[in-house]
Amino acid sequence: MKTNVTLMSSDRRLFGSIIRHRTKPDMLCLTDLQDVYNKLQVRNSWDVRSIQNILNIKLAPENAERLYYVLKERGLIDSRILEFMEECHKLTLIKVLKNKGLYKMYGRGDKRIIFASPDIFVLAALEFNPQLYAKTIVWLTDNLIYNRIGVGDENNMLMQRINHNWNPDGEFYKHVQRALNYIIFNRHETGIRNEASSEELRLLEKLQNNYAFAIDTGFVNDKEDLLLQLRQEYLKKWMSGDNRIKSKLQIR
């Protein structure tokens, strides 16, 4: 599983809009946050506010000071507060954050999007509105990223077991990945796991671990047996009781 991706999970939904979340480095999309605030500002007659003003050392020096102490605690800054503030006044706070890899821009013109570290995102959310801040804090205490890492680890373990025991061709691995997606999501498409919720990732991690264990213990005898077990798991979840639907999974 790729580690440097942009998550579009439903767990990152903010007032109806999904906030893009890059996993490596860990960054949230400030452009999406600004768009959400702009909509709420019109609807609720809030004050007009912008990321640029929030991170402007001349307009809001207290925000630069707040970020300094957070970054200092994280070991990302080794200078003194006066040196940091002087550097921000000389270069601007945004340029200083860029130089430290905590603020990144992609694209140009109307297509430009901005990502920043969670610390910067939280500060911006707090400065925008307490409601945005509350949502963001809940996000950052969930298990989305940790579950995604767990899914990647368990996926590697399962693929290693398959390779060690049966050494199949490349197409077989694709069949397994496709089947796993169908079991969890009842569909398969490129990048689908990047849209998964924390709970869906937890279930996928558990599923992969179970099949790796089944291979180790001999409960699954060969690769054809594995495909059969996957299909049975899919039918059990999606073709029983109130969840009965038309089967979409096709496994050779």
Image (cartoon, grey):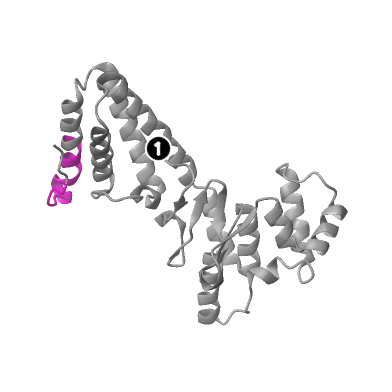
Count of picture labels: 1
| Most foreground residue, 58 or 213 | 58
Q: Quadrant of the N terminus?
A: top left
Q: Is residue 100 left or right of residue 90?
A: left
Q: Quadrant of residue 201?
A: top left
Residue 238: in magenta span: yes
Q: Residues within 10 Å of mark 1 (few under 14, many from 20)?
A: many
| Most foreground residue, 37 or 248 | 248
Q: Secondary structure at mark 1?
A: helix
| Most foreground residue, 68 or 98 | 98
Q: Residue at x 20, y 34 (%)?
A: 230
Q: Quadrant of the C terminus?
A: top left
Query: Where is residue 88 drawn, in percent x and y?
Result: 79, 60
Q: Residue at x 36, y 33 (%)?
A: 155
Q: Quadrant of residue 208?
A: top left
Residue identifier under label 1: 151
For the magenta stretch, what is the residue range?
232-248
Residue 192: in magenta span: no
Residue at far right of view: 82
Query: Where is residue 38 drawn, in percent x and y?
Result: 54, 75
Q: Is residue 53 left or right of residue 118?
A: right
Amino acid at circle 1 = Val
Query: Where is residue 209 drawn, in percent x and y?
Result: 34, 29
Q: Please tell me whether residue 177 is drawn above or below residue 20 in the rendered image.
A: above
